Image (cartoon, rainbow, N blue to C red):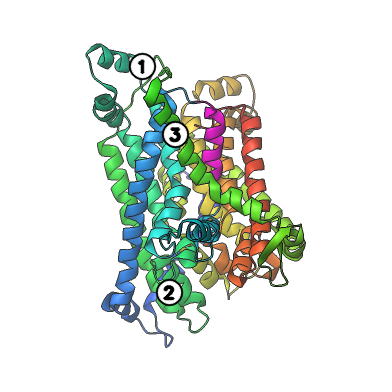
Amino acid sequence: MTEIRRRPLDLWQAVSIAIMLIYVLFLIIPLFSILKESVVTPDGEFSLQYFAKFFGEAYYLRTILNSFKQSLATTFFALLIGTPLAYLNSFFEIRGRSVMQILIVISSMSAPFVGAYSWILLLGRSGLITKFMWDVFRIEMPDIYGFGGVVLVLTLQLYPLVFMYVSGALKNIDNSLIEASQNLGVGPFKRFFQIIMPLSLTSILASAMLVFRRALADFGTPLLIGEGYRTFPVEIYKQYVGESSQNHSFAAAISVIAILITTIVFAVQKIASNKFSYKINALYSIERKKAKGLLNAVIHLYSYLVVLIGIMPQVYLIYCSFRKTNAFGNFVDGYSLDSYKRAWSFVRTALPNTLMIGGIAIATVVLLSILIAYLVVRRPNALNNIIDTTSMLPYIIPGSVVGIALVITFSSGPMILTGTIAIMIIAMCIRRIPYTIRSSVAILQQIPITTEEASISLGASKLKTFFKITTPMMASGIVSGAILSWVTILTELSASIMLYSAKSQTLTLSVYVFISRGTDGAACAVATILTAFTVLSLAIFMKVSGKRDIIL
């Protein structure tokens, strides 16, 4: 009887198994922990009472309706602003276009709740614009709080996503199509709706669904500026860490509902994208033309006005950070560095924490993303396909849900991580890795495998080929995804607010703490430092990638 020889475990098989185990430990098990918490009573009995409570009371159902209402409105206005802006930026010469692009990206880099706080300072009951309009013109400005304020903040935060997606799509439109339509007598207005829009539909839909999901899962904005306007991410936070009462099982049940809702939204996006998906390659890129007369004035006015309104909150925060404050941290006449001095007690801990947590997280994200991308593209099999799908789960799950899942799982048992820096790093990696994975996969798919085969045929090992040949060729995709992951790590709030302790507080959390305490000056100072970090990150990205154009 012949003995069956087992094939030795291949290096890449070992990598696949190791990565799958990491996802099982830090994502799959925590998600199952949430599910278990939602259907098991304190007595240990199976029950659906928490789901019955949610769907049986109008107040809780209203949180879902509010979330969808806010997300739909935000998506509509983001498309209304971002799509025409991308069209004008791509087809017409605009003075200061490069600077305008940078400002658009910067305006999207801060945490949404920071934008909400900025608009409170501008349009709140005692805001700068509110007081000015009443004192000078006796005009009472609309209330910034509630549904309108939430939509305003999220629209100005998320329209840059539409702008970047659509601008990228317009780059792939062949200029000969535009010239042909002009020769046939098609005017600019008709051309936009009958040619440009259909050719860009896939990217428009993708950006719309991304904006919708981001608005749906946003936590900080409705918490800060919504007042009585409750959404389900806020309700999850309220039930889990509420000051007056806590109901962890009910919070877990709402989290399960949130996962189902966001999964459905993601599935709808995939179906819509596949239905309208097609490829077009531009042999001749679109040539920007200078508009004349009134049209030129309107183009510049619209572009500058949108960018100005979008960047205004961050500029005003920087200005306020240099205003004098009283003993309570509120603004008084004059200018000083008092706010930075007051904030230093937090910043001296939060700044190193931000750099350490963010640095370790982004290094881990880059390493895992390179490995996962290689497994998915070069070594496709059932296990690697599961890894690819699993890695995208955090992309569709609200951050507060990820935070709760990790707390439930690692608060007891053999691995207690709650309250440590380690759990913050894990949350950052899990939540932000999809961006770098997708960009790494996209760039690796464009690299011919013959390059690696040639290296191996010349005597290089597979491992040496991977690190010396494949990885450097993936650099542009890795850097593009990594900078987006890094910026979102810097501004992360929804998951970290569930996980942090005094020893693991970051700059974003420091801003939130100061805002919640009503210490306006210090909040502006820390927000300014955070903005400086994000701008520096963008500058480094442009330097490393060699790009002068922000659009990918």
The amino acid at mark 3 is Leu
Residue occupied by mark 3: 301
Q: Is residue 151 placed above or below 249 in the rendered structure?
A: above
Residue in the picture at 58% in, 74% down:
411
Residue in the picture at 62% in, 34% down:
463
The amino acid at mark 2 is Ala
Residue occupied by mark 2: 251
Name the mark on residue 199. none
Q: Is residue 479 placed above or below 492 in the rendered structure?
A: above
Residue in the picture at 48% in, 36% down:
304
Residue 255, percent from left and from top? 41, 68
Nearer to us: label 1 or label 2: 1
CB within 8 Å, label 1 to label 2: no
Q: Is residue 373 shown left or right of residue 424? A: left
Is 97 magenta? The answer is: yes
Label 1 to label 3: alpha-carbon separation: 26 Å
